Amino acid sequence: MTADTGPMRPGTMTGALLAAAETEYGVQIFGRDGNMDRRSFRRVLADALRLANGLQQRGFASGDVVAVVLPTSHEFVRVMFALFLLRIIPFCAATPRLGRMADYKESIAGMLRAAGASAILTDASLLAQLTSAAEAGGAVRGAIALQELENAPPGAPPVASEFADAKPGDVALIQFSSGTTVDPKPVALSHANLISNTRAILATFPGKIAEHSGCSWLPLHHDMGLIGGLFSAVVAPGDITLLRPEDFIARPVLWLRALSDSRATVCPAPNFALQICVDRVKEEDLAGLDLSNWRIALIGAETVREKSLRRFYERFQRCGFRFESFTPVYGLAEATLAVTFSDPRAAPRSVHADRTALSHGEIRAIAAADEAATPVMSVGRALAGVEVELRDPAGAVLPEARVGRIFVRGPSVMTGYYRREDLTVRAVQDGWLDTGDLGFLYEGELYIYGREKDIIILNGRNHDPQSIEFTLDAVAGLQHDRAAAIAVEDERRGTEGFVVLCEKERGKVDAQELARAARDAIIAGSGLIPEAVAIVETGRLPRTTSGKVRRAEAARQYRDGALETLALSLR
């Protein structure tokens, strides 16, 4: 990555690409065969200009909103920057999944309607699947294959000066809050939001920026992959190696091989990816694997679990991976991406909180070996220019060691929800964003204690569902990180109880015995008694695009009888 270019740095993503195109950096795709398909930012700009010309010929214009439905590819990259050149507002959505088309169609149609999108830009191979979704979502131009836009009228290729650059305050991108499907919330991000957040991220990297390069398998429709990966590389500028998510899922070692071969220093990942590598990377795959250059392992998108970090480190330290490389982070779509970062130069921190005090919203640190200890990982300190406050239900600012609702203010906080002023005024007041997340400050660092809407209240005490779910770690036969503790009404006792839904591992298992073992582990680990423990088939629990279990949707399906259970262990 090049050194900082000073006060004249570009204030828009278009300007960032123009600056990056003057360097030798670029994007490379790591394939299943281990080969790199590289394109410089100079090539990205040239390809984007040609595509922008084709889009203009089809009547697309500044202010239009379009959905981008493409796999991780060079085509995705050039589409995004062609849209920026034309000042068209994109939002990115996942590609269709086999066997889930009905749910997918409903989901993307809802996003199209919420954003007022006029078209879906996609690949010819996906056109048939997306045409009906475009119609259901009211996209008047329908689904359009990129191949239809390739043949622009003959003549000299357009140049960047022929396209008017956006202003920093203009809406650049719409992204949807994680897990919103019934009433999708379109987050409007300006160019200034994107530039501010990526620069703040880059400022956390130790040493010279020129020493760093990136790698990511995260989907480009997800903010951590798009903004934390691709856009940060353009703004720096620097090299970025991309791996298709489906390749990572099929063969997790490919991710580690991409890191090793590219010698990347920065790579984001959700917690579950670490566990997948521990579980599925074979001993023979470690030969020749060098992870010593991976200095900043940004762990976010879901709860960071100390056990997962330890297990990954213990497995891959022989490949040069250092525990100090783990950098837990916190962010959300409404704040562009990142809010807090741990110090990349130090080992991640945790506090072992007394379970009883924690249920009352107070933090009392105890020994890790104490049976009443609940481990919570730090996600670091606020990025430059960002403020974080913890508030009680009445809105009063809380001191350290008290659990409260997290509020954020800074230049990366969203412009608002696109075309939804009603939602915006509830979420942002006086510049402060209500994240809806719970957490606490301890010795100057932020710790996350779950989503307020997911909190389970038993006998007047608050319990984070994740602390209940963590008790299942040692139960053989269950999927790691694939459980949902949900609140239910216990009409018999006239109070609230909770149910735990667990995915089993693939293959033959005794589901009823698994349910009993899970129930015993929950009682032993948390001291709480569930109304029921339900075992469901692998992959059955609803998830967000980043892999997090959607507890509210899982609870709805359970209440409606729409969730097929293999076994139940009742109170």
Image (cartoon, grey):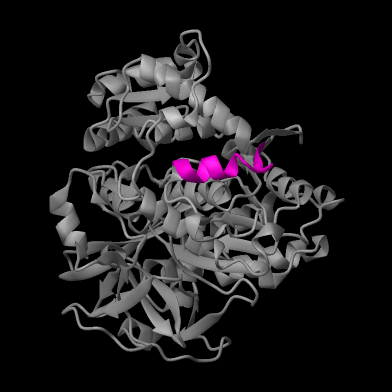
Q: Residue furthest right?
A: 288
Foreground of the two, 554 or 187: 187
User: Magenta segment, which residues?
Assistant: 14-28
Give above or below for 525 relative to 491. Answer: below
Query: Residue at image x 38%, y 88%?
Result: 401
Give above or below for 183 relative to 427. Answer: above
Residue 418: x and y in percent read 23, 45
The reply to whether residue 349 is visible in this rendering is yes
Foreground of the two, 313 or 155: 155
The reply to whether residue 532 is visible in this rendering is no
Asked whether 344 falls inside the magenta stretch, the response is no
Q: How many numbered discs?
A: 0
Quadrant of res 92: top left
Left-right relation of 98 to 334: right
Residue 504: x and y in percent read 52, 50
Residue 407: x and y in percent read 29, 71
Query: Residue at image x 49%, y 72%?
Result: 379
Give above or below for 349 relative to 263. Answer: below
Residue 339: x and y in percent read 42, 66
Give above or below for 3 relative to 245. Answer: below
Q: Residue furthest left?
A: 422
Foreground of the two, 455 or 10: 10
Left-right relation of 190 to 162: left
Foreground of the two, 398 or 475: 398
